């Protein structure tokens, strides 16, 4: 009996040790890791973050959906603990998918519930809410009809049948593997209604944001830094003896801004004051091309036209402008990019993941400039001159692309002005609230306030459908004009409308298997680039530098996962890190 009792006590000691096992040193909370992750962001709303390279990288650290994707695009469980797929007993009945959530809490300690998914998804499907991600949910019962204004959002086939059980309804049998990949989209993460509803600026200040992912936003200083801090509630039982770093190892990620100067940025990295650089300054890319870790990204830098503009109404003009671009030269200048040969980037898999969509589809557009053909096509269209603006985000990579494109178009006889758009501080309604910034670029894009605009189009999901469908009228995600007499459907932001293209996307949506759907999507991409409301320029690559002190930086489909990142001898770096933070604050104050 004594021997048995000793074994039990020993087991308890071992289990306690395992539960409380920690990487923390002394009484410290953990490593503070300074990094230059990406360009500055002005709005952290997951439903609108697809027009730049930075948003998905950071949002994936802050929010988590039902599933997550690894670097290859394979889905793994995120908030989903288990699922049950229930087929109807009678033909023509409703298919149901019940997902039981893992128990975790928001960064303010409130439990994450099935209703949080219901609210986030219904928000996207509102006919008056513009969001390209809407078509990702069209498999849900009544989803398409809701977005077209035919039925109310309360009829959407998603509900919370229990506190932690989310139920989805479908009118047809679905491919669960494809659906779960789609569920990993950052646009489909849960949101808190009490934080989001009736607050246009909820995603622009740290005080009004809550997150359900590994990191919480603790400080947001525009032009200076973004502090992400370990969420102590992320799957952690706060009432037990579980270590603070059981699920998230780093204590803070200090995302530095104002480090765009190549020499200054890399000097800090070499001196171990910056430990990770996720966006290498343009001037230094050649020197660090062999040192950086480089992978294909899910981003195609593309030019969107306002096709309602008289200058661009004729597809021949748009095709001529595409022919004038030397994509190879632009990619070479950017170093971490490839000349675009289509709209869908190399990262996207084809049907059944047998090769990439791009490899199977082949080259659709030329990568080298063909100025003579461009001039001939313009002459045929009767357009040989004109003045217009090319809008771009105000960062060095996008500006470099825009200026190269403008130079090519000017050589054809046009007068092109590059318009750089950033953030603009606005006055708050309440004096005690922090200053927020409006994203002038995102605002211009949302209301088609552009002639041509450069978009770093970030794939909403790891499927070609997610990128091609929004160019079809009923799949645009822009809903309907509720003020019009006939509730007119609002099509793609470019103004592009083609009945043939709409038919192709509708057939792809209704296809019974992924092979048939993908074949139709290849046809759709070819048609899109024949009509050319959008001009792909380069496929962006993801290039990053990891300091020697770090380990466990893992790649995901949209960026990096820092949950398991360890920092060697992190206590020794604290003084130098604080010095860098003080210096950065002083520079901003000046």
Image (spheres, rainbow, N blue to C red):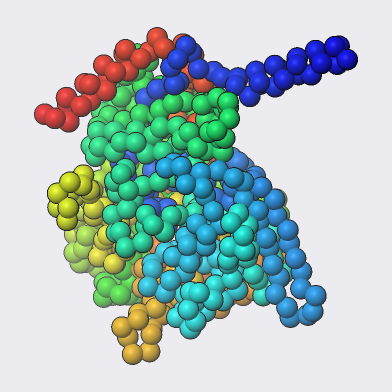
Residue shown at the point (65%, 45%) measured from the top left: 76
Can residue 590 be seen here? yes
Location of residue 532 (image quadrant): bottom left
Can residue 295 be seen here? no
Picture coordinates of residue 516 (x, y %)? Answer: 69, 67
Picture coordinates of residue 207 (x, y %)? Answer: 30, 44
Q: Would residue 246 be found to the left or right of residue 451 on screen?
A: right
Q: Would residue 443 be found to the left or right of residue 112 on screen?
A: left
Residue shown at the point (19%, 59%) measured from the top left: 415
Number of numbered tags placed on the structure image = 0
Picture coordinates of residue 585 (x, y %)? Answer: 20, 27
With respect to residue 262, does 196 lie above or below?
below
Task: Please identify the residue farthest to the front as the structure is shown.
Answer: 1
Task: Please identify the residue farthest to the bottom as the structure is shown.
Answer: 485
Q: Nearer the viewer, residue 124 or 54?
A: 124
With respect to residue 75, does 387 lie above or below?
below
Which quarter of the rendered picture does the C terminus lie within? top left
Location of residue 172 (image quadrant): bottom right
Q: Nearer the viewer, residue 83 or 580?
A: 83
Location of residue 485 (image quadrant): bottom left
Q: Would residue 266 be found to the left or right of residue 363 on screen?
A: left
Q: Nearer the viewer, residue 579 or 387?
A: 579
Which quarter of the rendered picture does the N terminus lie within? top right
Residue shown at the point (86%, 11%) measured from the top left: 3
Residue shown at the point (23%, 53%) measured from the top left: 438
Picture coordinates of residue 477 (x, y %)? Answer: 44, 69
Task: Please identify the residue farthest to the left as the structure is shown.
Answer: 590
């Amino acid at each position: 009996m004594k021997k048995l009792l000793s074994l039990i006590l020993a087991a308890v000691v071992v289990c306690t040790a395992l539960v409380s096992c920690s990487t923390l040193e002394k009484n410290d909370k953990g490593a503070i890791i300074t990094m230059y992750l990406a360009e500055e962001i002005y709005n952290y709303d997951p439903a609108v973050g697809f027009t730049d390279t930075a948003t998905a990288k950071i949002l994936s650290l802050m929010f988590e959906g039902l599933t997550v994707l690894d670097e290859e695009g394979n889905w793994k469980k995120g908030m989903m603990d288990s699922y049950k797929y229930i087929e109807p007993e009678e033909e023509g009945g409703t298919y149901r998918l019940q997902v039981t959530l893992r128990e975790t809490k928001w960064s303010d300690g409130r439990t994450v519930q099935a209703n949080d998914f219901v609210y986030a998804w219904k928000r996207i499907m509102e006919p008056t809410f513009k969001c390209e991600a809407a078509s990702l949910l069209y498999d849900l019962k009544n989803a398409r009809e809701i977005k077209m204004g035919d039925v109310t959002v309360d009829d959407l086939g998603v509900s919370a049948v229990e506190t932690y059980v989310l139920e989805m309804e479908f009118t047809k049998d679905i491919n669960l593997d494809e659906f779960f990949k789609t569920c990993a989209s950052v646009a489909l993460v849960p949101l808190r209604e009490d934080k989001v509803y009736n607050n246009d600026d909820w995603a622009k200040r740290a005080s009004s944001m809550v997150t359900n992912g590994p990191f919480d936003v603790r400080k947001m200083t525009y032009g200076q830094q973004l502090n992400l801090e370990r969420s102590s509630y992320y799957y952690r039982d706060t009432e037990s003896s579980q270590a603070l770093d059981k699920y998230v190892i780093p204590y803070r990620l200090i995302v530095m801004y104002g480090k765009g100067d190549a020499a200054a940025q890399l000097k800090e990295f070499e001196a171990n004051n910056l430990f990770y650089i996720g966006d290498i300054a343009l001037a230094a890319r050649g020197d660090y091309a062999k040192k950086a870790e480089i992978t294909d990204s899910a981003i195609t830098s593309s030019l969107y036209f306002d096709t309602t503009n008289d200058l661009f109404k004729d597809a021949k003009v748009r095709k001529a402008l595409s022919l004038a671009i030397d994509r190879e030269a632009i990619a070479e200048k950017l170093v971490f990019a490839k000349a675009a040969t289509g709209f869908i980037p190399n990262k996207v898999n084809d049907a059944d993941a047998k090769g990439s969509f791009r490899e199977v589809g082949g080259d659709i557009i030329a990568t080298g400039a063909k100025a003579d053909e461009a001039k001939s096509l313009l002459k045929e269209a009767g357009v040989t001159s004109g003045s217009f603006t090319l809008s771009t985000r105000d960062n060095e990579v996008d500006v470099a692309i825009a200026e190269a494109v403008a130079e090519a178009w000017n050589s054809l006889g046009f007068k092109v002005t590059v318009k750089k758009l950033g953030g603009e501080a606005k006055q708050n309604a309440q004096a005690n609230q922090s200053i927020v910034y409006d994203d002038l670029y995102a605002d211009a894009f949302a209301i088609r306030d552009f002639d041509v605009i450069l978009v770093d189009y970030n794939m909403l999901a790891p499927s070609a459908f997610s990128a091609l469908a929004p160019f079809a009228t009923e799949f645009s995600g822009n809903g309907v004009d509720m003020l019009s007499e006939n509730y007119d459907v609002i099509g793609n932001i470019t103004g592009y409308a083609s009945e043939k293209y709409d038919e192709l996307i509708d057939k792809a949506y209704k296809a019974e298997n992924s092979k048939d759907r993908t074949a139709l999507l290849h046809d759709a991409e070819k048609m899109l680039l024949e009509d050319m409301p959008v001009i792909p320029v380069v496929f962006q690559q993801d290039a990053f530098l990891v300091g020697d002190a770090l380990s466990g930086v893992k790649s995901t489909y949209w960026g990096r996962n820092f949950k398991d990142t360890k920092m060697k001898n992190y206590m020794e770096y604290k003084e130098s890190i604080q010095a860098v933070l003080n210096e950065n604050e002083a520079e901003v104050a000046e």
